[in-house]
Image: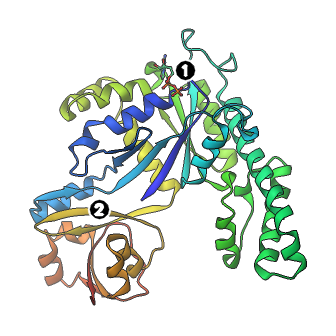
Amino acid sequence: GFKMGIVGLPNVGKSTLFNALTRTASAQAANFPFCTIEPNVGEVAVPDARLNRLAGIANSRQIIPTRMTFVDIAGLVKGASQGEGLGNQFLANIREVDAIAHVLRCFEDGDVTHVEGRVDPVADAETIDTELMLADIESIEKRLQNIVRKVRGGDKEAVQQERLMKAALEALEDGRPARVVEVDEEDAKAWRMLQLLSTKPVLYVCNVGEDDAADGNALSARVAELAAQQGNAHVVISARIEEEISQLEPEEASLFLEEMGLSEAGLDRLIRAGYELLHLETYFTVGPKEARAWTIRSGTTAPRAAGVIHGDFEKGFIRAETVAYEEFVSHGGEAAAKEAGKMRSEGKSYIVKDGDVLHFLFNT
Ligand code: GDP
């Protein structure tokens, strides 16, 4: 599955947000309940109204949403790249996630200490970005030394790695994240293998006070500007409100949201933003037993999509039978959609589309 790491300076609201995410009633109501893998790792059901709709039409006995993993990565402070405090563990944890949800304090509260003694989310964002870039510089410099001999010996892989590391280093030393380096198709794999922290996509999570949850505030507006400049994403959320909502039953939660002037839970927006950031899409498998959602990267071929369910589905893939979500719904089910000629038979090179309802045929 896909993993988002929650990072941020101390006291910005990371734990509050993580607890809200993983305790939320909707996560628990799902048939795949939130499960604690480790104290700081939680799986969250991805909200998708289409799944319930499909299950209703097909009379599915079970509804199984797709999931996203959140990791609460505590312990980042200035100097983390130098191994201060929990620094090193922190950086190792970030290497394992697909994207970074960076919580920024956008609320004023004299009772909550700010580590730097002032509330300035843009400066905080830069503090953490800088730590990630410094960590990348350090790891590249170490690795460059280690491959010198291989490069001299003409080792092709080493030559490619050296070239990519130097490109990254040039950006980093210029104060820009490795994310900005443009990489050709043939270098893509080697580039990923470098596992640079500053290549991970970033979602800024502006944690605003309760009164600002609906419209944000001047601080979150500055973060929005920064995000736009950097090509990063941002969402405005009140971790405190989300924590309250997470303790309510679904009906109570909707009433509460309405009172606060919010159209949907911030956590739903957060999860969706993560989905967009990672270019993720959803396809469905629907039958009387269960209606289930599955996550793929956009641009995934049918066999690879099948492999998300089971490796054997990918290996023995023959073809996929496909009905688009809209057709499934407008015809009132798969049989009727098929009758109307809306079921397609697709081969190995088919690129699965968001909302496809799929059956895979495969050899065992
Ligand atoms: P972490 O260190 O980043 O995990 O931060 P916590 O989630 O532990 O939050 C630090 C403190 O800030 C706690 O006392 C929270 O209750 C408080 N806090 C979190 N979000 C808000 C908020 O939106 N408004 C206010 N006033 N306090 C908040």
Mark closer to the chain start, 1 or 2: 1
Which image quadrant is residue 244 in?
top left
Which image quadrant is residue 66 in?
bottom left
Distance Cα–Cα, label 1 vs label 2: 36 Å
Q: Where's residue 324, x and y in %?
A: 29, 72
Report if the CB atoms under discs 1 and 2 are less than 8 Å apart: no
Quadrant holding the C terminus: bottom left
Q: Is residue 201 above or below residue 298?
A: above
* Coloring applied to the structure: rainbow
Q: Is residue 198 left or right of residue 345?
A: right
| Residue drawn at point x = 79 percent, y = 75 percent | 158
Q: Amino acid at mark 1?
A: Phe
Q: Residues within 10 Å of mark 2 (few under 14, many from 20)?
A: many
Q: Amino acid at mark 2?
A: Ala
- Answer yes or no: disc 2 within 8 Å of ligand 1: no
Which image quadrant is residue 331 in?
bottom left
Q: Is residue 303 left or right of residue 288?
A: right
Q: Is residue 193 left or right of residue 164?
A: left
Dot in front, 1 or 2? 2
Q: How many labels were placed on the picture?
A: 2
Residues 273 and 246: in front is 246
Q: Secondary structure at mark 2?
A: strand
| Residue drawn at point x = 31 percent, y = 35 percent | 23
Is residue 44 among the parts visible in the rendering? yes
Q: Where's residue 197, x and y in %?
A: 66, 52
Q: Where's residue 31, x and y in %?
A: 20, 51
Q: Is residue 270 above or below residue 210?
A: below
Residue to which mark 2 is pinned: 293
Residues 258 and 146: in front is 146
Q: Where's residue 1, x and y in %?
A: 42, 59
- Answer yes or no: disc 1 within 8 Å of ligand 1: yes
Residue to which mark 1 is pinned: 107
